[in-house]
Structures are given as C-alpha cells and as structure tokens.
Amino acid sequence: MFAPLVATVLWMGIYPSSFFAVMEPSVGALIKQYDTVRAAAIQDGTLSPTVHSPCSPGTWSRAAMNYMLALPEIFLAVAASPCSCSASSCAGDATNRIAWLSVLALIVTSVLLLWSPSAATQTAFQSLYVVDQFAVFLKVSC
C-alpha cells in the first residue's frame, strides 16, 4: 500500500531534477516578474535598493519576532507535551487527572487568546503569523 509512496520519495531524493524540470518554467516566470516589479519600484522611488527579501539573513528584527502574539499556541504546545507523554505511561486514576490537566490547559489557552482583544490585525514573524478577530474566534470555537 505504501510502496508507490516510498518509491516516489526515493525517486525524488535520487533524481530531483525530474520534478524540478516541470516547475522550472513557472518559477522562472515568477522570478522574472518579481525582478521586473522590484526594478520598477526602485526606479520610481517607492522601494529602496537596499531593501532585502523578508527571509534574507539579517533582516529579522526584534519587533518582527513578537512572541506575545503566539503565546497561546506556545503555552498549549508546552502544556500538551507533558500531558500526552505522561498519558501514554499512566493507568487508572492518573489518566483522569491528566484529562483534567488537559482541560485546564485548554481553558488557560482560551483566556490567553481573549486576553488581548485588539480590533486591529496584528502580524509577527515577518507577517507570516497573522492575528485578527476572525482567527481568535476560530481558535476559541475549535
């Protein structure tokens, strides 16, 4: 059942050019379009020639790495890891305590989500992480 998947993974690892060749024309066109738009923006003065890509080394600032926006997710990951590890090794009454600790972790995460109800859309990690009211609503409702 997994044989085709394993064969494809091995093929991609050994002969990646067979997969990259299919993508090369569209990626080349995208890069050409980006370079054209960037050159035009530099020429009309809307972009500084020293501006780098958001993912370039050295462009991450402390303001862009706002961990407070991701605090609910960070807390949930930190709280869920020990709960899930200890749940697999416990039996009987201990599993009941672990279940209630998991519920408590979800409640604390919900409080952290609702703690900063800013109406404005906020971003972190070079705009890769977006927090708005709809995202908070989905996180709390799920």
Image (tube, helix red, strand yellow):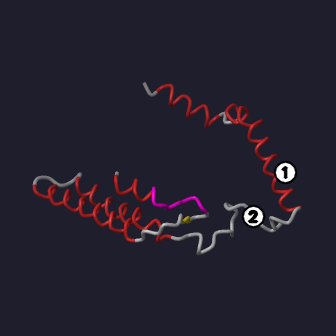
Q: Residues within 10 Å of mark 1 (few under 14, many from 20)?
A: few
Residue visible at 32% across and 63% down in the picture: 79
Answer few, some or many: residues within 10 Å of disc 2's Cα (few below 14, many 20 plus, some between 14 and 19): few
User: What residue does disc 2 label?
Assistant: 52
- Closest to the camera, between mark 2 and mark 1, is 1
Specify the farthest residue to the bottom.
62
Closest to the observer: 126 or 47?
47
Look at mark 1 in the image and give the residue it sits on. 36
What amino acid is at disc 2? His
Question: Residue placed at 57% from the left, 58% from the top?
Answer: 128
Residue 128 in the magenta stretch? The answer is yes
The boundaries of the magenta stretch are 127-134
- Which residue shows up at 63% across the image and 35% down it? 14
Camera-side residue of 65 and 85? 65
Q: Secondary structure at mark 1?
A: helix
Measured from the top left, where is residue 29 in percent x and y? 79, 41
User: Residue 123 appears in which quarter of the rendering?
Assistant: bottom right
Quarter-wise, where is residue 11 in the image?
top right
Q: Is residue 8 left or right of residue 108?
A: right
Instruction: Estimate the x, y position of residue 130 in percent, counting from the top left.
Output: 53, 60
The image position of residue 6, as x and y in percent, is: 51, 31
Q: In the rendered view, would you say 31 is above or below 66?
A: above
Element at label 2:
loop
Amino acid beneath label 1: Thr
Determine whether, in the image, residue 22 is placed left or right of residue 61: right
Query: Dots 2 and 1: beta carbons under 8 Å?
Result: no
Picture quarter with the N terminus: top left
